[in-house]
Amino acid sequence: MFGLHLVKQGHVSEGQFIEALEEQRVRSKPIGKLAIEHGLMTARDVMFVLAEQALSGERFGELAVSLGKITNNQLWDLLKAQRDHRPQVEQILVERGWISAEEVEDERKIYAMTLF
């Protein structure tokens, strides 16, 4: 993971990285909201799954599949949409002023060379 590379290279602290991960999680659209936006579930369906989730503690998407509200393939599509629309950790680190965009690009090149 590129964010861990930035920590290992001393560009950001572990605490900053963890904060950025948490912000990334908070800024991600919930699966239920995405399911409504994609026309896969109604608001009523989402509320039903949320109520069941409060009792079971299961993840929303897995529970929606087990309750027959969406298919496993639809869940994968929603998870991909969620991933594609959330900010990257390094973007958050730059927004917070903990690292510059130039440093990120320079380190990305170095990181890419370590993958091969």
Image: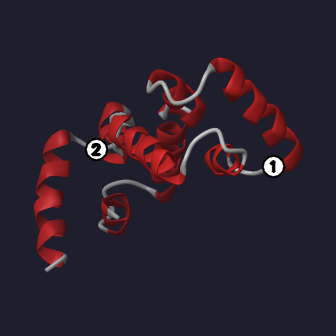
| Picture layout, residue 91 above or below residue 62 | above
Disc 2 is placed on an element classified as loop
Asked whether, in this view, residue 23 is left or right of residue 58, the answer is: left
What is the x, y in percent for residue 43?
Answer: 65, 19
Image quarter of the N terminus: bottom left
Relative image position of residue 40 (x, y in whole percent): 51, 30
Q: Position of residue 41 (x, y in %)?
A: 58, 28
Q: Position of residue 70 (x, y in %)?
A: 58, 41
Q: Where is mark 1, residue-wise?
A: 57
Displayed quadrant of residue 67: top right
Look at 37% across and 46% down and name the residue there: 89
Left or right placement of residue 91 versus residue 42 in this view = left
Q: Where is residue 52, by image quadrant? A: top right
Packing grade of label 2 (10 A; few <14, some 14-19, many >=20) is: some
Query: Which residue appears farthest toward the top when viewing the image?
Result: 43
Amino acid at circle 2: Ile
- Tag 2 residue: 99
Residue 101 as seen in the image, left or right of residue 41: left
Mark 1: few, some, or many residues within 10 Å (few <14, many ≥20)? few
Q: Residue, x 37% and y 62% (percent of image)?
A: 7
Instruction: Identify the residue at the far bottom of this view.
Output: 116
Q: What amino acid is at disc 1?
A: Gly
Q: Nearer the viewer, residue 91 or 75?
A: 75
Left or right relative to 14: residue 58: right
Q: CA distance from mark 1 to mark 2?
A: 37 Å
